[in-house]
Amino acid sequence: MSTLYVSPHPDAFPSLRALIAARYGEAGEGPGWGGAHPRICLQPPPTSRTPFPPPRLPALEQGPGGLWVWGATAVAQLLWPAGLGGPGGSRAAVLVQQWVSYADTELIPAACGATLPALGLRSSAQDPQAVLGALGRALSPLEEWLRLHTYLAGEAPTLADLAAVTALLLPFRYVLDPPARRIWNNVTRWFVTCVRQPEFRAVLGEVVLYSGARPLSHQPGPEAPALPKTAAQLKKEAKKREKLEKFQQKQKIQQQQPPPGEQKKPKPEKREKRDPGVITYDLPTPPGEKKDVSGPMPDSYSPRYVEAAWYPWWEQQGFFKPEYGRPNVSAANPRGVFMMCIPPPNVTGSLHLGHALTNAIQDSLTRWHRMRGETTLWNPGCDHAGIATQVVVEKKLWREQGLSRHQLGREAFLQEVWKWKEEKGDRIYHQLKKLGSSLDWDRACFTMDPKLSAAVTEAFVRLHEEGIIYRSTRLVNWSCTLNSAISDIEVDKKELTGRTLLSVPGYKEKVEFGVLVSFAYKVQGSDSDEEVVVATTRIETMLGDVAVAVHPKDTRYQHLKGKNVIHPFLSRSLPIVFDEFVDMDFGTGAVKITPAHDQNDYEVGQRHGLEAISIMDSRGALINVPPPFLARKAVLVALKERGLFRGIEDNPMVVPLCNRSKDVVEPLLRPQWYVRCGEMAQAASAAVTRGDLRILPEAHQRTWHAWMDNIREWCISRQLWWGHRIPAYFVTVSDPAVPPGEDPDGRYWVSGRNEAEAREKAAKEFGVSPDKISLQQDEDVLDTWFSSGLFPLSILGWPNQSEDLSVFYPGTLLETGHDILFFWVARMVMLGLKLTGRLPFREVYLHAIVRDAHGRKMSKSLGNVIDPLDVIYGISLQGLHNQLLNSNLDPSEVEKAKEGQKADFPAGIPECGTDALRFGLCAYMSQGRDINLDVNRILGYRHFCNKLWNATKFALRGLGKGFVPSPTSQPGGHESLVDRWIRSRLTEAVRLSNQGFQAYDFPAVTTAQYSFWLYELCDVYLECLKPVLNGVDQVAAECARQTLYTCLDVGLRLLSPFMPFVTEELFQRLPRRMPQAPPSLCVTPYPEPSECSWKDPEAEAALELALSITRAVRSLRADYNLTRIRPDCFLEVADEATGALASAVSGYVQALASAGVVAVLALGAPAPQGCAVALASDRCSIHLQLQGLVDPARELGKLQAKRVEAQRQAQRLRERRAASGYPVKVPLEVQEADEAKLQQTEAELRKVDEAIALFQKML
């Protein structure tokens, strides 16, 4: 068995790194090296077992006498699960290895340098601020990277995160106080997210961050985590101390002896920087008038300035209407039709991030289709939300008037609901407009509008006439507080691990759940006092027992066939039935059967013809006994008195709770209206199988078929007042020949579009005249999902024929979250096929569910529910706390939620703006089930907006006031190499954007557009353009201006579906190619590959060489800290072709790399003395002139220390690969990684040796 030797010290971060990796190995598919999980030993290995001096901890012995591996990096890599951040050729794996290397070489020395002296574990001759500065420099790349990423590589913790987090444990525990953590906000957020992962918590426990008050002493444990110093490192530190002392002496002398006759001037006060976020648009613009963009652009991007005034103008101009630009919607359009209806939000609701994601996706698709010239309709609407709205208004009524709805009466209560709807109901519409949603508001629908209500009545009557809707008494989910049946989606399932006390509405004391009570039923007629022991989680329901069930193959009970047991409290005997539903291995293998209060028992009762005795009324009270949770104690006492109680034990269980009232949901037998779903479900399933209906991502098709194959009858009646009252009438016939009917008897129920039609039907059914018929309409209303299921039809006026119905039905797409695939999508498909014979839409795209940055479900009690308007406008931490105080959370939950907010948003939520939120949500979209949303990443896209702003501002200056764009975007023929390159890259961005939209691959689209604007247009093209625009070659400058205009024009159109506000603002400031150009960007044609066909492989190859040279030069400049100097650069090439290409791009290299002279050496010619060398490619090397720019002696010290460490790493790898059993015991991928790392280390050694030789020559 393998053994992992680790230090027991709680701060020994190398050992902690190995232990956490081992935890991940246990949770995954096992350690990456393929062996079993190791045994943990909290001490060094015995020297007798090691064939060499004891290794540094952690150390891993792979079986007695097997291979030894030591050091945190190597051990963690072996223990980490295979495929979760291990080595490999993929980009992600390379990224992981780079961050692991950075943690080892940069973070650990900086972290120890800053922390160990503060704890008294190492003396420090350096100024404390200096060591903290070194730590800050090490954290800077992390902070920048994590601004746009949740983790270092991928969407879950990897080896990279493990290495970096453990490296930073000491600073976060002992050095980084709250002000410092605010500076490193992204690093802190990432660190906290990681240490809260279960695998980290299992090893680290609760990590307490440094509060600013350090303990008086810190006693080191058996092994302090100080790193051993090499001779070179000690020498380097001595030099640093010597330099620091000289500098301090010089400063002291200067302070004591100021220059004669010159008094020290006081420093001028720093001018307070104005927060760019406060810039607002203040010009008077009446709603619906076009925004005035004739003035100068503000200095920086401000969401409030940019987003002002545009939406009312778009709406006023009718840009969102399908009729825009055509005589009517029926006009032939070769581009086709795009129609999508919004998933109607609840009228009671307000926006949350789930809505924001849905609308960001839907609006980007709608705008893309509209810009492509299709007849486009995105239809808005709102759902009446039966239960939610009734509860809200009932609470308001009680709070303001002290009345219940029953005291007020049905008609008066409904008037109060309509009044509330008129006052509050359009709130969510205003919020959708804030998100920039381009809906046709003239077609907005409410599910209780007359047009939609007529469709609901028509559908019910038709389906009832066909026998698809019927009346039946069955078990339903019953909320005793609401006094109504509720749907499955309105039931929350609370998992309990054992005995738990829960608060239940209507009860003063908490109620016990999560226990299993066992008791005995005596066998009737038994001479030996034989008994059958059963168990239940709800002991009071034994009052409704009608049988005991056992498995037919259970040998323990075969002798009881045909026998009964005696109910101890009621005068009835219970038959013992044999049914395969019983689990023989659970408990005693005998189960009590209560058909009226359990779904499984109900089905057993149906199979065996058992009576269903209801013992509970609609309020949840037991009939003729105290309320159920009080009766529980009485039943227990009675069982004990009769000697039938057999025990009680903890029992993990799921308690169903009504998500509106928080009451325990009771299964009750009630007469209700049901829909037969079998045939409709088969038709819906077949539509997907045939390919008539596409469900994307395709992984959801399996769920679709599983639901359809196992569908149950749908209960559609609700015992409410607010909603569509069921158009069914109970018939009473004034004729002695017709016996009176009972509620469950469907023959005595008729449906009708109105009462007169129902009366005619009843008279015909019973063969009497209409005057002998008395009708009583059902008091209940229809399930909200029934009217929602008709939404694609009802909004277009069905069943009446209309222009909209003929053009827009079937729709094109239904886009929504995957969590309502069955509750809404499936029912729309079933009802659409049944009522019209056609699918309501051709494609269904299901997006992921939004969770918080830690992967937790959004919950008010966790404090992680985010209002998108808070992300758009920003909010302080106190503002977030105030929202909790105005919510309906319990006081205990408020405090917990505040802590969650404080951890996730210590400085509140910064203002990000609508465009950044929309773009960020779409960039997060992956074809998976969950999105872990980090608000700080959204802030990164606000910075991207600022980049767009500054780039366009620079470009407009470069174009000049008199610039006139050419009539077409085609090149003129005199374009430079970089002009051709940027056009080629723009062509690729256009191709990827259209391809991504067609495939619903939103991250591909956002990545293509982000990369083009940021990394290609801003970072490369604009930099190369500066000398051209300031040069004397007017032809080149004009070509550059035309190309720059094309990039802005096409680039803004590409971004418009995601970022409508900032792109409109910038687009309106550009000159137009043609006078008759569209008035708004949102109705301007979207760029297509046929328009932008400028792919240029030759130019891309040339610029790739320039960028490779630039990266190498920048790397060398960073290595030697040449930040303010423009060193000369000499290019050594392998052949004449590469030399010609390098010469062609040398000017671009000079501009991009901030180099001095960039010269190509003749073939075979040596580079000047004193140059640092780097490789740009296998055909080109860079020689950067250092002579006179750096201190050779200082650089030699650094290189010699680096050489010692590289030699040590290489030697460890060679010994590891030479160990016995290595080729057999170590997995192939680990061997390949070791070989690659050895080659990399040896290459670094060669590079270091070359540099040492260089600096030795310079001495």
Image: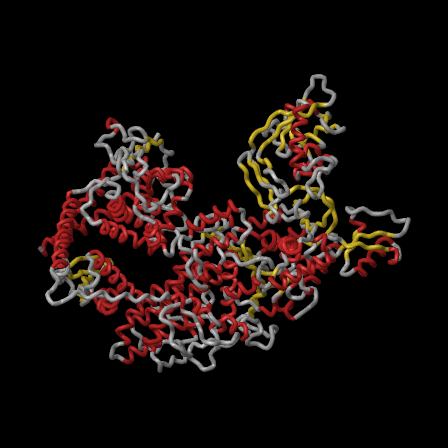
The answer to whether residue 858 shows anywhere in this view is yes
x then y, percent, for residue 1153: 24, 64
Of all residues shown, which one is farthest toward the right?
736
Quadrant assignment, res 225: top left
x then y, percent, for residue 162: 35, 44
Q: Nearer the viewer, residue 972 or 869?
A: 869
Check the picture and name the quadrant holding the C terminus. Answer: bottom left
Examine the rendered structure and indicate whether residue 918 appears above or below residue 222: below
Residue appearing at x 77%, y 46% in the figure: 744
x then y, percent, for residue 919: 44, 62
Residue appearing at x 40%, y 57% in the figure: 937
Is 788 left, or right, of 893 in this rendering?
right
Q: Nearer the viewer, residue 1111 or 258?
A: 258
x then y, percent, for residue 495: 55, 40
The answer to whether residue 1166 shows anywhere in this view is no
Check the picture and name the quadrant holding the N terminus. Answer: top left
Examine the rendered structure and indicate whether residue 67 appears above or below residue 303: above
